[in-house]
């Protein structure tokens, strides 16, 4: 039986490429999404990958969704915590709601979903968890105190949980993407983005598939000796 993989935010941007990469690697993939029904339907129609709608920041919604996915599709053996948002602003304009939204969605979601699949992975003595961090969680970024804190938190979360998973057959790794050509990055003011691209030694934005390739590697059955690592995929923008 193909292993079941859940990719949060798995129907758009980097998440869609991860979902399709895992599907191509022979996994049974399900994706979660927060609100864009039209994008989810188009994604399912194109790929056959089912999409489940729930808010990854809300523990009760996650619990209900995980139970539903496991009943309808099977036990989740691969979890990719990809869902994330930005609320960029300099400190003077960064209000508490913008802080909370990013912390809850980007970092709180990792707790919610790992917590909910952990016992099952433990019982089966197999699990692959990949958390999507960011170059901006490694290096910081002007106007992203909230996002950098959440993504940096993901890197710490990953290393701590990897230590607990190691003896259980559960690997926990992070991928730290650089600037990838997605809607999120296209929302950066063009003059700012131009300066950022000028600092990427590879000379271009990343492609979503560049990130998916790393996730497929880290979730392979025979990648069991790779745990607690952060795979930077950023065109050389930051060497960590
Ligand atoms: N370094 C130094 N100064 C900077 C700066 C930088 N990198 N970026 C902006 N500034 C300065 C401007 O020059 C301006 O200065 P003056 O007032 O002296 O002219 C000032 O900051 C503007 O500050 P404001 O508070 O008025 O902010 P704003 O409303 O213009 O917006 C911003 C500021 C939100 C930071 C905006 O510049 C922005 O969106 N920057 C991009 C942030 C970014 O890279 N986000 C990444 C999104 S993609 C992602 O997150 C995916 C991933 O994982 C990589």
Image (cartoon, grey):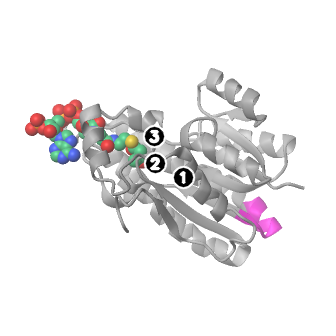
Marks 1/3 in contact by CB < 8 Å: the verdict is no
| Residue wearing tag 2 | 206
Identify the residue at image location x=33%, y=35%: 188
Q: Are marks 1 and 2 in contact (CB under 8 Å)?
A: yes
Q: Residue at coordinates 58% horizontally, 59% vertically from top-left?
A: 214
Residue beneath the point at 90% across and 56% down:
1
Labels 2 and 3: the sequence-earlier one: 3
Q: Nearer the viewer, residue 197 or 51?
A: 197
**Distance (Cα) linking label 2 and label 3:** 6 Å
Among all residues in the image, which is located at the extreme front? 203
229 sits to left or right of 86: right
The tag earlier along the polypeptide, 1 or 3, is 3
Mark 3: which secondary structure? loop
Estimate the x, y position of residue 67 in percent, counting from the top left. Answer: 78, 44
When the figure is inspected, residue 88 is found, relative to residue 162, above or below; the finding is above
Residue 127 in view (yes/no):
yes
Q: Position of residue 207 (x, y in %)?
A: 50, 45
Residue 201 occupies which quadrant of the picture?
Answer: bottom left
Judge the density around disc 3: few (<14), some (14-19), many (≥20) Cα neighbours within 10 Å. Answer: some
Instruction: Determine the main secondary structure of the stretch shown in magenta.
Output: helix
Name the residue tied to disc 1: 210
- Cβ atoms at labels 2 and 3 below 8 Å apart: yes
Camera-side residue: 206 or 114?
206
Question: Label 2's element?
Answer: loop
Q: Is residue 55 left or right of residue 239?
A: right
- Whether residue 33 appears in magenta in the rendering, the answer is no
Q: Mark 1 and mark 3: span between their CA atoms?
A: 11 Å
- Numbered marks: total: 3
Name the residue: 62% across, 25% down: 39
Residue range (magenta): 119-127
Q: CA distance from mark 1 to mark 2?
A: 6 Å
Label number found at residue 181: 3
């Amino acid at each position: 039986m193909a292993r079941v993989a859940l990719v949060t935010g798995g129907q758009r941007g980097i998440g869609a490429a991860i979902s399709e990469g895992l599907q191509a690697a022979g996994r049974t993939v399900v994706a979660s999404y927060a609100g864009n029904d039209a994008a989810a339907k188009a994604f399912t129609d194109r790929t056959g990958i089912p999409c489940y709608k729930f808010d990854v920041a809300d523990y009760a919604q996650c619990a209900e969704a995980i139970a539903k996915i496991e009943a309808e599709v099977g036990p989740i053996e691969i979890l990719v915590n990809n869902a994330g948002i930005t609320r960029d602003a300099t400190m003077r304009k960064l209000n508490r709601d913008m802080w909370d939204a990013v912390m809850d969605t980007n970092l709180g979601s990792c707790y919610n979903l790992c917590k909910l699949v952990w016992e099952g992975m433990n019982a089966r003595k197999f699990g692959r968890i990949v958390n999507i961090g960011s170059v901006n969680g490694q290096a910081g970024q002007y106007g992203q105190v909230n996002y950098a804190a959440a993504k940096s938190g993901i890197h710490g979360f990953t290393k701590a949980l990897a230590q607990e998973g190691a003896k259980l057959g559960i690997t926990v790794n992070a991928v730290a993407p650089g600037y990838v050509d997605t809607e999120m990055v296209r929302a950066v003011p063009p003059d700012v983005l131009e300066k950022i691209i000028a600092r990427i030694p590879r000379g271009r934005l990343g492609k979503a598939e560049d990130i998916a390739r790393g996730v497929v590697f880290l979730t392979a059955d025979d990648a069991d000796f790779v745990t607690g690592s952060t795979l930077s995929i950023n065109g050389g923008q930051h060497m960590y």
